Image (spheres, helix red, strand yellow):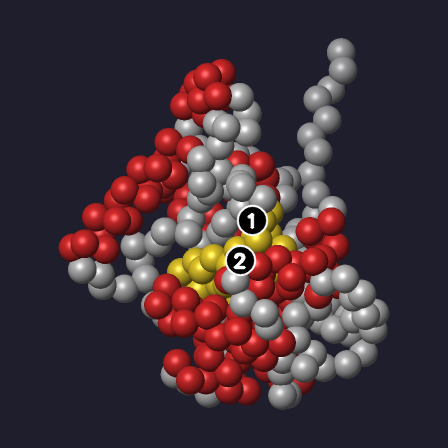
Amino acid sequence: MLSRVISKRSLYTTPEFTTTVLPPVYKTQEQFDLVRKSQHNHLVNQLNAKVCQTKLEPLTPYQIMEKIRDDKSKASLFNTCSHLVNNHLFITNIIPSDNVVEENVVQQRLMGHFEVETMGEVINKMVTAMNDKIIGQGFCFIIEDSNGDIVPIFSNNAGTVISDNLDLKYMDVDLNGGLLGVNEYLKLYDRMHNIKRSLNRKEKDKRNRVFGSKEGKIEGSYNRILACINLWDYAFIKDYGIGYKAREQYFINCMENLNWEVVNKRYNF
């Protein structure tokens, strides 16, 4: 009789985000180490504690998110995985590269999206959007959406814009971000209803049979993350201070010093 082999992995560990120079985004090594070591290790330890001795233990953060996406009782674990993934993406696209990007397609398409001629104008518009969308903590993503457009999108708290390619829920809408008026809540309700429909497999299959796979897509059902900027206080507070102005300057420096080689590789992958 063959015995059942149970596959187990070791504990999640904090990766070595190695770089010979301090990313220009940061003024001190202490602040950079807080993001890439202390906080990232904290998130890794949280994940280990939450999945230890459970059926989720052998799974990657992506797989865990896929597994628990519809289980409201696992919201805290989903957020830990999401935050961990987001911060990893952020670190890898702010570590500088020695290579020059000859054709920065993502930058060009961002300028096309905003109908402007310079990245400075793009950044100014994104700063305005950030102050309008983010209440407290969050992330900024540059994504390729379901229409193939390159657009920025903001997510409060530990929200993710990873969705249908991994059967994940779409979390650009977050009601935990702060107090909103009645009209705003009604808009969010409508948005969440559309998202729920777009990620419902039966609804999606029904649309695909009627319209074909492309025409059956609904906004938010297919996204690729090209860049991520961590807007949580811990990501900048030691170097920039507190308040909207501090966050604005930090965000501008992130946009001006993104590793566009990494971003364009994600786009061309």
Q: Is residue 137 visible?
A: no
- Would you say 45 lies left or right of 3 here? left
Q: Is residue 119 above or below residue 160?
A: below
Q: Nearer the viewer, residue 18 or 220?
A: 220
Mark 2 residue type: His
Which residue is located at x 53 percent, y 21 percent?
212
SS for dot 2 = helix
Residue 122 picture location, percent across and down: 53, 69
Q: In the orientation shown, which residue stands out farthest toward the right?
A: 99
Q: Which residue is mark 1?
A: 149
Which residue is located at x 27 percent, y 42 percent?
190
Disc 2 crowd rating (10 Å Cα; few below 14, some 14-19, many 20+) is some
Q: Which residue is mark 2?
A: 113
Residue 59 picture location, percent across and down: 62, 40
Which residue is located at x 47 percent, y 68 percent?
126
Cβ–Cβ under 8 Å for marks 2 and 1: yes
The answer to which image quadrant residue 196 occupies is top left
Residue 73 picture location, percent across and down: 36, 42
Q: Nearer the viewer, residue 160 or 35?
A: 160
Mark 1 residue type: Asp
Q: Quadrant of the N terminus?
A: top right
